[in-house]
Image (cartoon, rainbow, N blue to C red):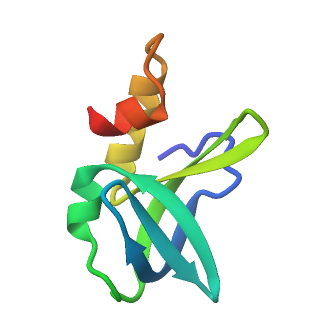
Amino acid sequence: MEIKNAMIAKLRGRVDSLGESFVILDVGGVGYFLWCSRQTLGFLTLGAENITLWVETVMKAEQLVLYGFSSFEEQECFRLLNTVQGVGGRMALAL
């Protein structure tokens, strides 16, 4: 396993909120907003404790964006899709 330039590599906490394409993970009282795939969101339950998500940290237009994944393999697939010209983070999650 190789972790590349990760500011935040993974987070463990309680599922505070779930949306159609995101989760807010409460880690020690700090809520992290993570964009997630449907696969990862299907793995989560509101209020679940000790959930670990792999995190891809992306800096774009002076904004820090976090993407969360239920497995390292899903994160690697996301990274690979992001190398394709014209494929951004949200599209990579949808694929």
The residue depicted at 69 percent of the width and 48 percent of the height is 64
The residue depicted at 42 percent of the width and 36 percent of the height is 90
Q: Can residue 36 be seen by looking at this rendering?
A: yes
The residue depicted at 48 percent of the width and 19 percent of the height is 83
Task: Using the image as rendered, state which of residue 81 and residue 18 is in the foreground.
Answer: 18
**Number of numbered discs present?**
0
Q: Residue furthest front?
A: 20
Residue 35: give x, y in percent of width and height.
45, 53
Task: Using the image as rendered, state which of residue 61 and residue 5 is in the foreground.
Answer: 61
Residue 10: give x, y in percent of width and height.
54, 63
Rendered view: 40 above or below 32? above
Rendered view: 81 above or below 47? above
Q: Can residue 77 be seen by looking at this rendering?
A: no
Q: Quadrant of residue 53?
A: bottom left
Q: Is residue 72 left or right of residue 5?
A: left
Residue 8: give x, y in percent of width and height.
65, 58
Q: Residue furthest top?
A: 85
**Viewport quadrant of the C terminus:** top left
Residue 93: give x, y in percent of width and height.
35, 39
Task: Using the image as rendered, state which of residue 60 and residue 50 is in the foreground.
Answer: 60
Q: Is residue 5 left or right of residue 52?
A: right
Rendered view: 56 above or below 14? above
Rendered view: 75 above or below 43? above
